[in-house]
Image (cartoon, grey):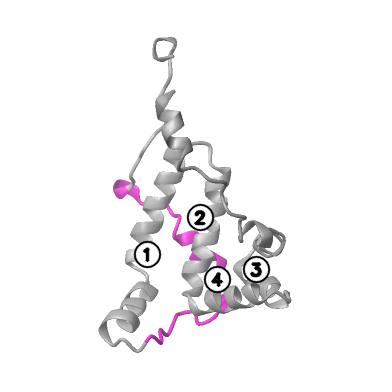
């Protein structure tokens, strides 16, 4: 068709993926079960990019890193998008009450010292019960999304 011919003039093969070339160390590190184990694997890697990633993770809120990893793993196992969105809403509400949110804003926006004092300070100190609390039901504040029901009429 004329449209395809016109587009063909401007197409070219995609460049080689830099990320694909690093997939082996990424998969090896990020398949660990905890943030602490992920960081340990990154640090043990001889790959400079992995070392940099470990430093970047260590600089972030340990609680936020643990909650994020848990959220991603829960989403992978969820039965529906609605279940994932309900979880994400719970986490968002809990984050608003997190001392690390206030501390991060202080360090980046208010004082601009770029030196947040996280609580807990390290990923090794994060209590799994603290992480679980981010996913606790919200009672009347619950988002309450449910998967749509499908009937023969909707197919």
Q: Are marks 2 and 3 in contact (CB under 8 Å)?
A: no
Discs 4/2, front: 2
| Disc on res. 127 | 4
Return the disc, 4 or 2, that comes first in the chain's sequence.
Answer: 2
Query: SS of the residue at dot 4?
Result: loop
Return the disc, 2 or 3, that comes first in the chain's sequence.
Answer: 3
Gap in angstroms between the C-alphas marked 3 and 1: 23 Å
Q: Residue furthest top?
A: 153
Which residue is denoted by mark 2 in the rendering? 71
Return the disc, 3 or 4, that comes first in the chain's sequence.
Answer: 3
Q: Are marks 1 and 2 in contact (CB under 8 Å)?
A: no
Q: Is residue 17 left or right of residue 83?
A: right
- Which of 116/44 is in front? 44
User: For the point 64% across and 72% down, which residue is it?
Assistant: 50
| Disc on res. 66 | none
Gap in angstroms between the C-alphas marked 1 and 2: 13 Å
Return the disc, 3 or 1, that comes first in the chain's sequence.
Answer: 3
Discs 4/1, front: 1
Which residue is denoted by mark 3 in the rendering? 38
Return the disc, 1 or 2, that comes first in the chain's sequence.
Answer: 2
Q: Which residues are magenta?
A: 114-141
């Amino acid at each position: 068709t004329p449209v395809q011919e016109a587009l063909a003039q401007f197409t070219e093969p995609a460049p080689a993926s830099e990320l694909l070339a690093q997939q082996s160390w990424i998969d090896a590190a990020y398949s660990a079960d905890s943030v602490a184990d992920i960081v340990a694997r990154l640090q043990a890697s001889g790959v400079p990019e992995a070392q940099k990633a470990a430093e970047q993770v260590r600089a972030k809120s340990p609680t936020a890193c643990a909650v994020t990893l848990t959220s991603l793993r829960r989403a992978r196992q969820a039965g529906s998008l609605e279940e994932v969105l309900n979880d994400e809403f719970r986490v968002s509400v809990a984050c608003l009450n997190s001392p690390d949110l206030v501390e991060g804003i202080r360090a980046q926006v208010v004082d601009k010292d770029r030196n947040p004092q996280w609580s807990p300070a390290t990923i090794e100190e994060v209590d799994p019960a603290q992480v679980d609390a981010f996913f606790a039901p919200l009672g009347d504040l619950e988002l309450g999304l449910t998967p749509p029901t499908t009937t023969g009429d909707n197919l």
